[in-house]
Image (cartoon, helix red, strand yellow):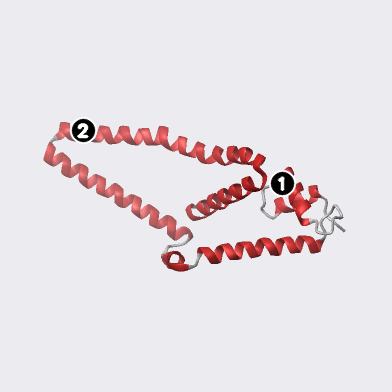
C-alpha cells in the first residue's frame, strides 16, 4: 500500500511538520523514488532516515567547538522546569526589593515632592510597558510567524528552509521560557 500526497500531508502534520499542500506535493515527488505516484513505506523510511541524519549532523555541528562546550556547560547548570520559574520569581522579587530600597533612600535624601515625582515617572513608565509595549510584542510574536509563513510559502525550498529555521527557533524559545 502506498500513501497519496493528501495522506502524506496528514501523516506529516501528525508528526509535527506544518507544510502547505503545495510543499507536500513537492516533497511527495522527491520521496517517490520509483515514480509510482505514491509513497511506499520504504520510501518514507528512506526520507525519514535522511531527515534524522541531517538533524544529527546539525546538532553535531552546533555542539562542536568552544560554543558547543559552553552550551553543554550552561545546559548542565541552568535550572529546569519549575525550578527555572522559581529562579525567575526570586530575581523579580529581588528587583522589586532593590527598587523599594532605592525609593526609600531617594525619598530620605531628596524629600517628599521629588520622591513623588520619581515614583510617578516610574508608574507611567510601567503603564507604558504594560499597556503599549507588552501587547505589541505579544501581537508580533503571534502574527509574525503566520505572516512570514504565507509570504515564504511562495518561495518553495528557500522559504521552507527559512520557515523551518524560524519554527525551530520559536519552538526552542517557547520550550526555554515555558
Using residue 74 as the reference point, say whether residue 41 is left or right of it: right
Using residue 147 as the reference point, say whether residue 109 is left or right of it: left
Query: Residue at (87%, 55%) from the top-left corner?
Result: 36
Quadrant in which the N terminus is drawn:
bottom right
Label 1 or label 2, whichever lies nearer to me, is 1
Residue 69 is at least partly visible in this image: no
Residue 105 coordinates in the image, percent (x, y): 16, 44
Q: Check the image and report above or below for 68 versus 154.
A: below
Out of 88 and 149, give the one closest to the viewer: 149
Q: Are marks 1 and 2 in contact (CB under 8 Å)?
A: no
Residue 126 coordinates in the image, percent (x, y): 34, 36
Using residue 85 as the reference point, say whether residue 142 is left or right of it: right
Q: Callout 2: few (<14), some (14-19), or many (20+) C-alpha neighbours within 10 Å?
A: few
Q: Quadrant of residue 155?
A: top right
Q: Quadrant of residue 49?
A: bottom right
Label 1 to label 2, Cα distance in Å? Answer: 60 Å
Disc 1, SS: helix
Out of 1 and 105, give the one closest to the viewer: 1
Out of 98 and 45, give the one closest to the viewer: 45
Which residue is identified by label 2?
Answer: 116
Out of 60 and 115, give the one closest to the viewer: 60
Q: Check the image and report above or below for 71 versus 30.
A: below
Which residue is identified by label 1?
Answer: 23
Residue 63 is at least partly visible in this image: yes
Residue 64 coordinates in the image, percent (x, y): 49, 67
Q: Callout 1: few (<14), some (14-19), or many (20+) C-alpha neighbours within 10 Å?
A: some
Residue 17 coordinates in the image, percent (x, y): 67, 51
Q: Check the image and report above or below for 46 versus 112.
A: below
Query: Residue at (80%, 59%) from the top-left corner?
Result: 33
How many dots with numbers? 2
Amino acid at each position: 500500500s502506498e500513501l497519496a500526497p493528501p495522506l502524506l500531508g496528514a501523516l506529516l502534520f501528525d508528526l509535527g511538520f506544518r507544510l502547505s499542500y503545495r510543499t507536500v506535493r513537492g516533497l511527495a515527488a522527491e520521496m517517490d523514488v520509483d515514480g509510482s505516484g505514491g509513497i511506499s513505506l520504504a520510501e518514507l523510511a528512506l526520507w525519514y532516515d535522511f531527515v534524522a541524519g541531517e538533524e544529527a549532523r546539525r546538532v553535531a555541528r552546533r555542539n562542536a567547538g568552544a560554543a558547543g562546550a559552553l552550551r553543554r556547560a550552561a545546559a548542565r547548570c541552568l535550572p529546569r522546569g519549575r525550578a527555572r520559574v522559581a529562579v525567575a520569581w526570586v530575581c523579580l522579587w529581588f528587583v522589586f526589593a532593590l527598587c523599594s530600597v532605592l525609593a526609600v533612600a531617594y525619598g530620605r535624601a531628596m524629600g517628599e515632592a521629588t520622591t513623588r515625582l520619581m515614583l510617578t515617572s516610574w508608574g507611567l513608565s510601567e503603564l507604558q510597558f504594560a499597556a503599549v509595549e507588552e501587547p505589541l510584542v505579544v501581537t508580533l510574536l503571534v502574527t509574525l510567524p503566520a505572516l512570514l509563513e504565507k509570504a515564504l510559502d511562495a518561495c518553495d525550498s528557500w522559504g521552507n528552509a527559512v520557515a523551518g529555521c524560524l519554527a525551530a527557533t520559536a519552538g526552542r524559545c517557547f520550550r526555554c521560557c515555558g
